[in-house]
Structures are given as structure tokens and as C-alpha cells.
């Protein structure tokens, strides 16, 4: 699929050679500022750097999801997930590198304005710089709470080099102020598309990010019992509402009628394929751009090889979130068949939310150049599950994928809106459920709840207040469940556990893989061992609860790197680290 490529050229004056990411280091440059900051084009070129920092597939989602209970590293445990980490000497998560670049662009843009540069255009790129400065600070905010707030470039003798940590409230307000500025000056998604600049940050991308920021802190305040949660949940609600009412975005949908009369809507699957790329897919609000193909490539990612290798496998803890087609969880639905020795791996997908089949491999799915998928390979997918998102056999052969990564999509905005509305008053109307969660379910294909010989196709059941009440469900849990399955393996799971204050409940649990189906042991292909460790219900044990812990007084914040504390006596370590 042809698309506009955002070329990420780097201005050497903007990107000096950092020896470290410390704020007290001043980057050397191979080009003097006087020779560079002269035109709008220079400011744009400097802003291009920020797009190279947008988190990619093998550097973002894999790592974050392994911190949660959603996935597990294939060969060893994750120290964040199981609570065994210690305070590091250094950490790439504590970084002012991008913040320095944003500060420099903001400062130097004033010189270009004085030289006659177009103010409106310069503000586009200043808006991008402030968006990304907010992004970088928010990543540290989630982990560490307050950190030193650096708003200017500094020489080594600047007194602010050694600065105390800003409070959580001060840093959050600074982040929101940066995003608000970006919203005020950035172009709309349609304007960017008209200008053939698809991929740059739009006004609605900044609004969507604002809803993410405010929902994180609003719910964290509510469940950790501090701050003004209603203030921030209101901000989250209004920012999401602004994206919705803009009309610039919508859910991606492709529908055809099959031979049995069922609706073959593969939109969710195609969101993570080439069919979902470009501005024609209005669900994508912010993306990580890869190339078109090997001949027209800027960067690529070996994402399918990464997923099937030794990096990440889905857990049964996560899989249990998928509803049956009647809208009920497996613990309540009469459609659910508990796995036994007569069931196959593929049959376990039957009658479930189609997003499970679109996200997880089952027999018959396109897989690699030599064959379609059969059963999990114990060497590569020892949980019994493999991630299907982004899988394409041609790219598997190349060991390079060019499928863009949706970083923020409209589905998340709808989920942010639904959760903010509910958590503000602990009530949500059916009208809002239809606008959000039921809209997501409405684009899914119908599910066969009959048999192959006598199929009976039904749509996924809607979520309503009456449905929740009549089935003894909990509305909060169902809103959260929808978020989990819709945004599966997109890097949200761990941070949701942190803000909901459920990490202390979920992370210490045993991590399980799939049921050890008989075909795993009898397959003529890759053999599973009959000595595979299973629990009393025959589910694979990935890591027992005895090896997992979570310290409530410590683990909701991350430790500052000890080298930073040693260099800056004003830095105070987070509790119990």
C-alpha cells in the first residue's frame, strides 16, 4: 500500500553526540548554531528527530507487557513483573536526552522568528516539540513520580543542573500545559493529510494523549487515595470527548458477507496489517511509521520473529479475559466448554470474542512461508499461545516488517471516555456504552455458536446496565475487561494495573500458560515434553506464585538510578528503594 513516508532526517546541530543521557551533560555539535537556525525548514528538520523516538514494536510493547501478567518472557522471568528487581545504577528510563532537544528547538525557534520565519509554521514545530517534551516527562512521571523539571538548555555551570525533584502535582501540570499548547497550534489530521505529511502529530493526537495522561492520574488518585481525582477524570473525559466530536477519526471497518450469511469483518485483524495503514484508516491517531517495502524502507522491524522467538508469549491469565459470544465471562457463560483431553487447541477459540482469534494464532492461520499455523511450538511459544498481530508470512521470510504501529488509536479514546465517565460518578448510561464499548463490539464479525454441521451465527452481545445487573456482573470490571482485550499487547496492561491499584493482587499470582492439550504431546511436529510442569487443572505453569511478589509500599513507584542520586545530592530516592 502506497503511503506518504515521513523522512526522519536528523539535524546535527540538534542532535549532538551525547555520551550519556544525564541532564548535566552538554551535547557537542558538529555544526554551529549560527549556521543552522535560519529558516522554517531548519526548525522542521530539527523536529523530525522526535519521530525517531516514537516507541516501536520490539522496543515498547514487548517490554511493557512482560511487566504485567499479560505476557511472559519465553526463556526467563521478568524482574519488574515478579518483584525481584533492585535499584539500578543507571537506567535509560531516567533520561533527559529528548527533553534537551525539545528545549533547544523551543529556544532556537525564537531566533528564526526574528529572522522573518513564518510564525504559524514555526509554531507547528514548537507544538511538536512541546508535545514530545510532555511525552518524555510523562514516561518518567509514570515510573518515578516527580523528577527535576528542566525547561531550558543548560551549561555545565548552570545552578539548575543539580535541581530538586518537582512534586507530582507540579510535573503533571507542566505536562498538561505543554499538551495544551500543542493542541492550540498543531494542524488537524485532515490538514496534515492534505499537506502530505501523514505521520506528524495532529491536534487530535495531542487531545488523545491528554485523555491518556489525565485518565492515568485521575484513576491513580482515586484508587491510591490522594489528589483531586475528579478534576483529572473530568479533563480525561473532556479531551476524549473533543476527539470524538471533531469527526476526524472513527473505527476502522471492512465488512463482507460470507457464504453462510455471516459477516466477515476482519477490521480488527487488518488494523495490524498493511490494509490498516495510512490516513484512509481514520482509527490511527498517532503511529510509528515504518517503510513501504524493502526497496522503499527507512526502518523496519522483525516483529513476527521477535514475537515467536524468546521474547514474549501470552499467558492464560490474559486469555481468560476474552468473553464468550453471549457477552459473558467464561466463569458464567453456558457457551464455555472447559478444556479437556478431547479438545484441541483450535477448538478452545470457539464461540469466543473474535478478537482472540485475531490476536492469537490458531490452526490454519497464515504463519510462515512454508506452512500455516498448526499448534504452538514449545521452543518458541511455551505458554501455548503466540501473538498473531503484525504477522505476515512474506515479512517473516524477510525478517523485516514494514507495517506501521498504531501508538494511539481511536479505540483507546473511546475506552478512555467510557472509563472516565464511569469513574467520575460510578455510573455510565447505555447511550455512552453504545457510543464506546458496543461500537467496538459492533465492528467484530459474527460468531458461530452452533456446530460446523449446523452453524448459528450471532453478533457479540452488547454491554448494558440491564445485562450487567441481570447476570451479576460488575460494570467497572467489564469496562476494564473491554480495554484489556481491545488493546491487547499494545503496551497498556502494566500501567493499568498500577493506576487501578490492582498490581498488588494480580502480579503475585501464578503465571499460567494454556491447557496442556493432548495434541501437544502427540503431534508429529515439534514435541512437547510429558514432563512439562502443569497445575492441578493441567494448565502449564510458567512461574509459580512462590517466586512472585509485590511490595505495596515500594513497587508502585520505580527506583531512581543510584548514579543520579550520587551525582545530585538534592535527589531523594523513592520509598523503600
Image: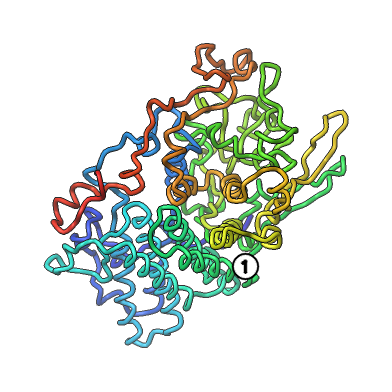
Disc 1, SS: helix
> In percent of the image, x 51 and y 36: which residue is there?
307
Residue 387's place in the image compared with 243, above or below, is: above
Report the number of discs: 1
Q: Which residue is mark 1?
A: 244
Side of 154 relative to 497 (left or right)? left
Q: Residues within 10 Å of mark 1 (few under 14, many from 20)?
A: some
Can the viewer see residue 46?
no
Residue 561's place in the image compared with 312, above or below, is: below
Q: Quadrant of residue 439?
A: bottom right
Q: Quadrant of residue 198?
A: bottom right
Task: State the quadrant of the C terminus.
Answer: top left
x and y percent of residue 76 in the render?
39, 28
Side of 413 relative to 472 (left or right)? left
Side of 39 relative to 538 (left or right)? left
Residue 214's place in the image compared with 83, above or below, is: below
x and y percent of residue 317 in the render?
54, 34
Determine the residue located farthest toward the left in the rendered image.
157
Of residue 209 and residue 11, the one placed in the foreground of this image is 209
Of residue 239 and residue 257, the one placed in the foreground of this image is 239
Amino acid at each position: 500500500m502506497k503511503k506518504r513516508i515521513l523522512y526522519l532526517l536528523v539535524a546535527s546541530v540538534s542532535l549532538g553526540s551525547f555520551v550519556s543521557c544525564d541532564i548535566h551533560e552538554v551535547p557537542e555539535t558538529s555544526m554551529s548554531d549560527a549556521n543552522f537556525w535560519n529558516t522554517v525548514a531548519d526548525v522542521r528538520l530539527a523536529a523530525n528527530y522526535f519521530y525517531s523516538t516514537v516507541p516501536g514494536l520490539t522496543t515498547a510493547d514487548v517490554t511493557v507487557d512482560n511487566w504485567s501478567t499479560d505476557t511472559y518472557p519465553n526463556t526467563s522471568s521478568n524482574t519488574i513483573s515478579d518483584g525481584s528487581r533492585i535499584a539500578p545504577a543507571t537506567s535509560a528510563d531516567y533520561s533527559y536526552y529528548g527533553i534537551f532537544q525539545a528545549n533547544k528547538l523551543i529556544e532556537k525557534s525564537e531566533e528564526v522568528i526574528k529572522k522573518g520565519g513564518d510564525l504559524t509554521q514555526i509554531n507547528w514545530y514548537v507544538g511538536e516539540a512541546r508535545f514530545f517534551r510532555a511525552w518524555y516527562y510523562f514516561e518518567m512521571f509514570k515510573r518515578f513520580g516527580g523528577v527535576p523539571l528542566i525547561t531550558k538548555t543548560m551549561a555545565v555551570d548552570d545552578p539548575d543542573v543539580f535541581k530538586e525533584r518537582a512534586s507530582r502535582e507540579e510535573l503533571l501540570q507542566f505536562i498538561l500545559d505543554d499538551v495544551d499548547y500543542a493542541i492550540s497550534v498543531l494542524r488537524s489530521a485532515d490538514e496534515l493529510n492534505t499537506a502530505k505529511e501523514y505521520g506528524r502529530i495532529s491536534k487530535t493526537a495531542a487531545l488523545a494523549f491528554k485523555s491518556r495522561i489525565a485518565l492515568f492520574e485521575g484513576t491513580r488518585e482515586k484508587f491510591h487515595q490522594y489528589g483531586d481525582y475528579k478534576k483529572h477524570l473530568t479533563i480525561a473525559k473532556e479531551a476524549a470527548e473533543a476527539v470524538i466530536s471533531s469527526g476526524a477519526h472513527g473505527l476502522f471497518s471492512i465488512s463482507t458477507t460470507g457464504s453462510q450469511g455471516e459477516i466477515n469483518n476482519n477490521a480488527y485483524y487488518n488494523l495490524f496489517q498493511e490494509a490498516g495503514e495510512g490516513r484512509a484508516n481514520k482509527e490511527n491517531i498517532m503511529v510509528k511509521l515504518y517503510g513501504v517495502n524493502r526497496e522503499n524502507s527507512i526502518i523496519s522491524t522483525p516483529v513476527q520473529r521477535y514475537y515467536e522467538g524468546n521474547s514474549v508469549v501470552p499467558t492464560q491469565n490474559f486469555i481468560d479475559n476474552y468473553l464468550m459470544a453471549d457477552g459473558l465471562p467464561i466463569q458464567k457463560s453456558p457457551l464455555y466448554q472447559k478444556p479437556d483431553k478431547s479438545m484441541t487447541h483450535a477448538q478452545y477459540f470457539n464461540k469466543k470474542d473474535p478478537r482472540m482469534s485475531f490476536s492469537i494464532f490458531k490452526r490454519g492461520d497464515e504463519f510462515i512461508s512454508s506452512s500455516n499455523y498448526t499448534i504452538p511450538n514449545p521452543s518458541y511459544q511455551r505458554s501455548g499461545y503466540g501473538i498473531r498481530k503484525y504477522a505476515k508470512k512474506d515479512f517473516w521470510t524477510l525478517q523485516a516488517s514494514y507495517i506501521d504501529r498504531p501508538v494511539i488509536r481511536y479505540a483507546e479514546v473511546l475506552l478512555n471516555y467510557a472509563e472516565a465517565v464511569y469513574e467520575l460518578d460510578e455510573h455510565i448510561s447505555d447511550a455512552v456504552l453504545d457510543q464506546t464499548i458496543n461500537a467496538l463490539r459492533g465492528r467484530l464479525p459474527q460468531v458461530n455458536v452452533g456446530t460446523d454441521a449446523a452453524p448459528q451465527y450471532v453478533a457479540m452481545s452488547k454491554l448494558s446496565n440491564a445485562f450487567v445487573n441481570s447476570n451479576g456482573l460488575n460494570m467497572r470490571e467489564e469496562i476494564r475487561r473491554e480495554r484489556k482485550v481491545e488493546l491487547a499487547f499494545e503496551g497498556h496492561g502494566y500501567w493499568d494495573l498500577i493506576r487501578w491499584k490492582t498490581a498488588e493482587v494480580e502480579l503475585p499470582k501464578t503465571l499460567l500458560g494454556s491447557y496442556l492439550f493432548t495434541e501437544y504431546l502427540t503431534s508429529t511436529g515439534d514435541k512437547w515434553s510429558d514432563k512439562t510442569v502443569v497445575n492441578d487443572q493441567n494448565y502449564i505453569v510458567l512461574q509459580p506464585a512462590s517466586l512472585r511478589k509485590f511490595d505495596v509500599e515500594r513497587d508502585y513507584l520505580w527506583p531512581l538510578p543510584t548514579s543520579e542520586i550520587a551525582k545530585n545530592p538534592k535527589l531523594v530516592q523513592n520509598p523503600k528503594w
